[in-house]
Amino acid sequence: MAETQVAHAELVEEYTQANPRSHAAFERATKALPGGLTHDVRAFIPFLPYIERAQGAHKWDLDGHKYVDYALGHGALILGHAHPAVVEAVARQVGLMTHPGANHLLEVEWATRIESVVPGAEMVRFTSSGTEATLLALRLARAATGRPKILKFQGHFHGWHDAVMPGQAPPWDQVPVGVSPAVARETVVVPATLDAAEAALRDDPEIGTVILEPSGASWGTLALPEGFLTGLRALTSARGVILVMDEVITGFRWAPGGASQKYGIRGDLVTLAKILAGGLPGGAVAGRRDLLEPISLPGGSRRKVVHPGTFNANPVSAAAGIACLDLVRDPALQARCDRLAADLREGMNEVLRRRGIRGIVYGDSSTFHLAFDSGLEPGEPHSRSALSAESLKRQRGLPLFGALSLAMLLEGVHIFALGGFLSAAHTEQDVAGTVDRFDRTVGRIEGLLPKSS
Ligand code: PMP
């Protein structure tokens, strides 16, 4: 295809023409669902494709287009779509039972597998999502310390319940619409620096819990400063503050035992979801026995922590989770995904360097992120330190990112939230093909991107 400069509007037109069935589905959806969507992250101009089926690293939409998928179930599908072991386990379990209304063996098997790989996972309690996992972790932590407030970091995402909503996006001190101001007051938000964390803990003795993404904000979009995790562990231990490692994304991806294992940092509690349940809904809180045990106290007890949930450890998710964890416990799997991601990042950076675009592709483990900024050196990921939480969160709304994602879809590549995840199902050919398509895409929208002078 000739490298022409096309405006976003032309891309929208071309894409809409090419996707009549998805377009019709979206028109119907806008009448039935707010914004036509079921997750805020899918807000997209003009609309994301409607996916009909998926296999391995690929998925197909209603109009017959095939995509290399880097959204991968929002990071849940480290084995790729429809892995035979997961499909078989789920199919078998659906026929046996989907809800026993009693105990079942799979919940024990599932917990045992978590405890065997996640550092510090002495016990496990299952939930239905990552949001529920962080909700429960904070409740357990408050129960233990008797201190109501939590400390979190700018840009770190922990789901959508009220206590973790403040500080997800700038302006950092704004209470998100609909969130209880009383709950938001108990959440202290600071930049992810040791000085800020130390000052907050020193100045406010009501803070009893610290929660963070051990990858840095939004699965490593913004890296943590050198020594931050070790320093934070020391700070929290010294003050009797509970440290919650939110490993909803990093769990089983950064290493079999997640970021805790990779970085050698043990949280008091670890929250898990996504890969945990093999691509089905599910979450868990794992960690210190003394922190989880108050759930087991009798109803009348003053120290009892209440935690019901109809679908906690539902057997279908448990079956998928067990099948998945049996495969991801082998570190060769993460090593392969990491290698593919490194190749992809390098290939994309080479495109940016060659074309003189002030942008970088960076990331840790098996992820990648894109950033464009006039302050960046083309394709030099070390210049990532020039990125601030404000600039990153803000740039997501810029038209160039909509155009980039859209042009990539037209090339048959689905990137996710300006980045993506690699899986064991991706191949070297997928990666090389993506780099070629990225090259054509950047050529197409070059006029929208910051260039070196
Ligand atoms: N914590 C982190 C670090 C996450 O990335 C997410 C979701 N992306 C959540 C919590 C919430 O998980 P869920 O979407 O399963 O509620």
Image: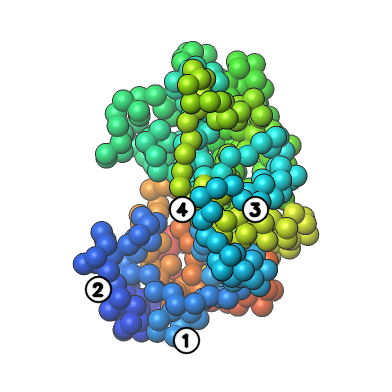
Give x and y (percent) for residue 278: 60, 59
Q: Secondary structure at mark 1?
A: loop
Label 3, on which residue? 106
CB-based contact (under 8 Å), mark 1 and mark 4: no
- The amino acid pointed to by label 4 is Asp
Q: Could you give the CA–CA distance between mark 3 and mark 2, rounded to whole angstroms?
A: 42 Å
Q: Secondary structure at mark 2?
A: helix
In the image, taking residue 27 as reference, residue 63 lies left or right, namely right
Q: Secondary structure at mark 3?
A: helix
CB-based contact (under 8 Å), mark 4 and mark 3: no
Label 2, on which residue? 27
Q: Return the disc, 3 or 2, that comes first in the chain's sequence.
A: 2
Q: Could you give the CA–CA distance between mark 4 and mark 2, rounded to whole angstroms?
A: 35 Å
Label 4, on which residue? 373
Label 1, on which residue? 1
Q: In which quadrant of the rendered view does residue 324 lie?
A: bottom right
Residue at x 27%, y 40% (from the top left corner): 177
Above or below, comparing residue 163 to residue 109 in the picture: above
Q: Return the disc, 4 or 3, that comes first in the chain's sequence.
A: 3
Give x and y (percent) for residue 131: 46, 44
Which is closer to the viewer, label 4 or label 3? Answer: 3
